[in-house]
Image (cartoon, rainbow, N blue to C red):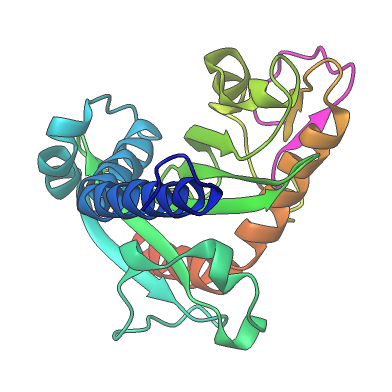
Amino acid sequence: MDQNSNSYTFIFAILMVLVVAAGLSFVATSLQPMQAENVRQEKMQDILKTIGVETDRAGAEELFDKYITEQLSLDHEGNVKEDVNAFQVNLARELKKPIEEQSFPIYVADYEGANYYIVPLRGKGLWDAIWGYVALEDDINTIVGVTFDHKGETAGLGAEITTNWFQEQFIGESVFNDDGELVGVIVEKGYKNPTKGDNKVDYISGATITGDGVTDMFKERLGRYLPYFNSKKDKNLEVAIQ
């Protein structure tokens, strides 16, 4: 074939595209197991971080197995779903289902002699999804720690939910008010009161919508666990009386 002809150039270009595409597909397929493992380890890191356990990816699984004593998947009435692996529940997919069909994962931790309940969170920021974890003390009210992440919030604005200064505000806050009503934690513009336990933290300047998303995420997600929380509180009360 004449190498200077248009047909030769066209065929050569097609072959090169096919070779490059095949190569990229092979590399992507080869990396999938490694990528999946990284995601799994990072999830363990985020869960552990809420109770104050810092680790790199390499050590995440060992510490996760050491401190996470239960991984439960609940139905909308707070009953344990024995046939569902809590760690494998994908909240992005679950939220698209009717409430009655959703699974609600929760992790129970035992760290330095204290019990904690860790709840996954997922909501909507300004541009796309936001998510994270919140750990509650054994009173199922006081926050031990949180982690947040996002898909597309603006750098320097909504993306600040991932920073320590924002997340540390939640430590010591309560998710129930003095009347026993679940209110979560409200991200409030102009809030300057350092009092802990009043259900409020300061917002991120210029990121009101993202802050509102965090507020809504807390109340909506934790609200789904009320049947389970109430059953645990009733059991704790029975033990205290005995």
| Depth check, front residue: 232 or 101 | 101
Secondary structure mostly seen in the magenta stretch:
loop
- Above or below, comparing residue 188 to residue 222 in the picture: above
| Depth check, front residue: 45 or 30 | 30
- Above or below, comparing residue 30 to residue 101 in the picture: above
Q: Position of residue 67 (x, y in %)?
A: 19, 44
| Depth check, front residue: 23 or 208 | 23
Q: Position of residue 191 (x, y in %)?
A: 84, 18
Q: Position of residue 96 (x, y in %)?
A: 65, 74
Instruction: Identify the residue shown where x is 31% and y is 37%.
Output: 48
Count of numbered circles on the image? 0
- Above or below, comparing residue 134 to residue 144 in the picture: below
Where the C terminus falls, by quadrant? bottom left
| Depth check, front residue: 17 or 231 | 17
Does residue 195 belong to the magenta stretch?
A: yes
User: Where is residue 106, by image quadrant?
Assistant: bottom left
Does residue 219 belong to the magenta stretch?
A: no
Instruction: Identify the residue shown where x is 67% and y is 36%.
Output: 152
Instruction: Identify the residue shown where x is 55% and y is 46%.
Output: 141
Q: Is residue 150 visible?
A: yes
Instruction: Identify the residue shown where x is 82% and y is 25%.
Output: 207
Q: Position of residue 101 (x, y in %)?
A: 56, 87
User: Where is residue 190, by image quadrant?
Assistant: top right
- Above or below, comparing residue 172 to residue 156 in the picture: below
Question: Which residue appears farthest toward the front when viewing the image?
Answer: 2
The answer to whether residue 202 is left or right of residue 94 is right
Q: Which residues are magenta?
A: 184-198
The answer to whether residue 95 is left or right of residue 107 is right
Q: Is residue 225 visible?
A: no
